[in-house]
Image (spheres, grey):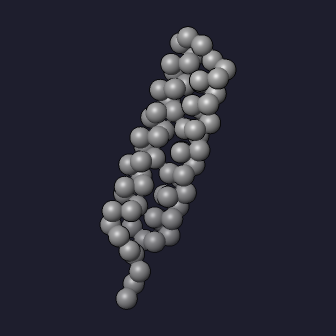
Amino acid sequence: MSALDAMWLSFFGLFLMFVSAATALLGREKLRGFFRFTVLSFSFTCLVIAGIIMLIVVLPGSRADL
């Protein structure tokens, strides 16, 4: 994976974290019942996927060509 690919992947992970936070706030404040469970489950799924993406980007280390 090139450095540019890693950058776009990390942007997607950040976007998923934003979506997770927004849907968690929506689910906790505005919704009740089944819809609350569904939205909060979606939020948790986005957060887990974003965490996996960040691990994929960060663990390989620097991509600088020497």
Give the residue drawn at x 61%, y 31%. 25
- The x, y position of residue 17, in whole percent, is 53, 45
Identify the residue at the far bottom of this view.
66
- The x, y position of residue 20, in whole percent, is 55, 38
Question: Image quadrant of residue 33?
Answer: top right
Please state which of residues 65 and 30 is positioned toward the viewer in this rendering: 30
Give the residue drawn at x 42%, y 55%. 54
Please state which of residues 4 and 46 is positioned toward the viewer in this rendering: 46
Give the residue drawn at x 57%, y 49%. 15
Is residue 6 toward the left or the right of residue 14 in the image? left
Q: Quadrant of the N terminus?
A: bottom left
Q: Quadrant of the C terminus?
A: bottom left
Instruction: Give the answer, above or below, for where 3 lies relative to 52.
Output: below
Identify the residue at the far left of this view.
60
**Label total for image:** 0
Give the residue drawn at x 40%, y 61%. 57
Instruction: Give the answer, above or below, for where 26 lies relative to 20.
Output: above
Identify the residue at the far right of this view.
30
Instruction: Give the answer, above or below, for where 44 lies relative to 60.
Output: above
Identify the residue at the far front of this view.
29
Instruction: Give the answer, above or below, for where 3 lies relative to 66.
Output: above
- The x, y position of residue 36, in whole percent, is 56, 18
